[in-house]
Amino acid sequence: MSIRLSQMFGMDIYTTDAEYVGKAYDFIIDLEEGRIFKITLEPFRLTSKQDIVQILKKKSINYDKVVAVKDIILINKNKASTKTVRTPRTSGILGLARRR
């Protein structure tokens, strides 16, 4: 089964231990590889670069922790990433987080 990215906006996010994490607000997508990179728990606003960096560092989830998506997004909070995630070189939002 597949799900559209537009359907994932606003979904509740829970851990496999049944802990509520938050809602999915924004998705960072690696267009070169065609995959979701991160889910933010807070929407991006027109604020300072520091605020955006804080959202990416403290209020986002790496998509490789997602276990399932249906009515909710289920993540494994204890899962350590086993693969190296290549951050795309951009001058956009991901570039801001990488510079800090």
Image (cartoon, grey):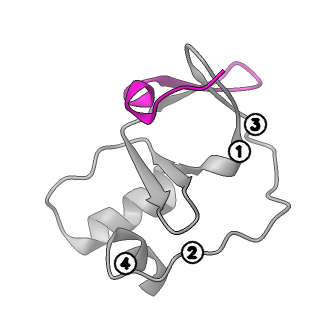
**Label 3 to label 1, Cα distance in Å?**
5 Å
**Label at residue 87:** 2
**Which element type, helix, strand or loop, lies under badge 2?**
loop
**Of the image marks 1 and 4, the number of the one nearer the N terminus:** 1
Quarter of the image for the C terminus: give it: bottom left
**Which element type, helix, strand or loop, lies under badge 4?**
helix
Q: Is residue 98 left or right of residue 50?
A: right
**Label at residue 65:** 1
Dot 2, how many residues are within 10 Å of its Cα: few (below 14), some (14-19), or many (20+)? few
Q: Compared with residue 32, is residue 40 higher up or lower down, i.e. above or below?
A: above
**Label 3 to label 2, Cα distance in Å?**
21 Å
Residue at horizontal 47 percent and vertical 63 percent from the top: 31
Q: Which residue is mark 4?
A: 96
**Of the image marks 3 and 1, the number of the one nearer the N terminus:** 1
**Residue 44 appears in view:** yes
Mark 2 or 1, closer to the camera: 2
**For the residue marked with disc 4, what is the amino acid?**
Leu
**Label at residue 76:** 3
**For the residue marked with disc 2, what is the amino acid?**
Thr
**Label 2 to label 4, Cα distance in Å?**
11 Å
Can you tell which quarter of the image residue 83 is in? bottom right
Dot 1, how many residues are within 10 Å of its Cα: few (below 14), some (14-19), or many (20+)? some
Mark 2 or 4, closer to the camera: 2
Residue at horizontal 60 percent and vertical 26 percent from the top: 2
**Of the image marks 2 and 1, the number of the one nearer the N terminus:** 1
**Of the image marks 3 and 2, the number of the one nearer the N terminus:** 3
Mark 3 or 2, closer to the camera: 2
Q: Which residues are magenta?
A: 1-20
**Which element type, helix, strand or loop, lies under badge 3?**
loop
